[in-house]
Image (cartoon, grey):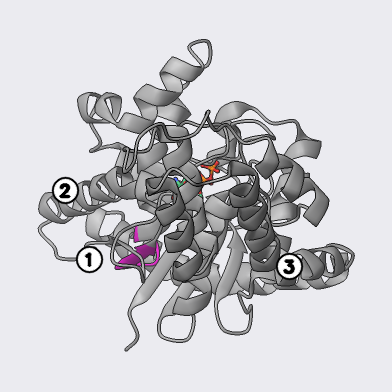
Amino acid sequence: MKETVVSGIRSTGKLHLGNYYGAVKNFVQMQNDYNCYFFIADLHSLTTHPTPADLHGNIKHVLVEYLASGIDPENSTIYIQSDVPEVAELYLYLNMNAYMGELERSTSFKDKVRANPDNVNAGLLTYPVLMAADILIHKATKVPVGKDQEQHLEMARTFGNRFNRLYNTEYFPEPYAFSYTDKLVKVPGLDGKGKMGKSEGEANAVYLSDDPETIRKKVMRAVSDGGPTEENQPKPEAIQNLFDLMKVVSSEDTHQHFDELYNKMQIRYGDFKKQLAEDMIIATAPMRERIQDIAKDDAYLRQVAKHGALKARESAQKTIREVRSLIGFKSF
Ligand code: ADP
Ligand code: TRP
């Protein structure tokens, strides 16, 4: 029996290099070796109250970009989270033994409260419970995600284990974050601080759908500094971020070449950025072309979503039947 894999991306915008290298690249690689479920986390995106039109458009972006990246709907189950209402039912059960204190301590919750103090809703607080339901609904053991999701995986294990203890069962297996690289990936943004993200502003992220000219412009404008003033000087965050990006998209030789120039104080940021932009353009080219073609074919997208929902519901309904029985909901 193949191990089960689940992962999802929120429908909050177009996919960027962080989503690709942190998550989707692993999805594509995993689909031959595992029983894979890849979904569009549209319920998760409701925490920020999108308009119906924006929500629909963003669901389409993620679906198109999953397919354009090489996820094969014949091989993996691709579905939209809200098409599987069993997830919301499991979320309700798991909420009964998720505690305020631990939810309030979650780093992503604290970050979001800080960023949007006027919209601290209960959905935001229980976000990790919904994520645990996404994973446990298919009894997955491996979850390909970027570094920022590690704590959420730990919470998913806690909620699954707590359910097991409460009902004296070993029903839910423990899910772990997964990457083919030796460490979980964190792709930095272009604004000199922190990770690349869908909602950090246009200038921070390079999208898979960006055309070459846009990529060149974004990279040339990326935050840098006046250059090293001493040999072998430690790199400030903005420069380290550009080197980290190069490590992701360029060859090891290219990265090493510019690293040596930096250490010898001979680096020219113009050349460095030009090379980085060209390597990003090459890395995204195959996807960029497919995105445009697939986005035109609504009939195909509808068929993929329908087929995926059927397969995902089959697995989810089995879990919900068993969970209901464990809880004690039995028919008379
Ligand atoms: P975003 O943070 O851009 O809104 P999501 O939260 O929907 O994107 O993340 C979807 C997936 O992409 C997750 O597995 C997450 O870990 C991964 N991811 C997002 N940003 C990055 C990044 N900068 N580096 C590595 N992985 C990332
Ligand atoms: N929380 C994830 C993020 O923000 C998205 C997500 C929701 C997810 N449910 C999931 C990832 C289940 C993996 C498995 O990136």
* Residue farthest to the bottom, as pictured: 1
Which amino acid is tagged 2?
Arg
Q: Which residues are magenta?
A: 136-143
Q: Which residue is mark 2?
A: 162
Identify residue for label 3: 285
Marks 2,3: beta carbons within 8 A = no
Name the foreground residue: 53 vs 15.
15
Taking the spot 63% from the left edge, 50% from the top edge, the residue there is 271
Distance of label 2 from label 3 (alpha carbons): 46 Å
User: Residue under circle 1?
Assistant: 173
Nearer-N-terminus badge (1/3): 1
In the image, is 119 to the left or to the right of 167? right
Which residue: 38% across, 58% down?
135
Q: CA distance from mark 1 to mark 3?
A: 39 Å
Q: Is residue 36 magenta?
A: no
Mark 1 or mark 2: whose residue is earlier in sequence: 2
- Give the residue at x 68% y 64%: 284
Say above or below: 298 vs 167: below
Which residue lies at the image location 81% right of the left edge and 68% below the top edge?
Answer: 289
Pick the front one: 288 or 301: 288
Name the main secondary structure of what is drawn in magenta: loop
Neighbour tally class for label 3: few under 14, some 14-19, many 20 plus, Cα within 10 Å: some
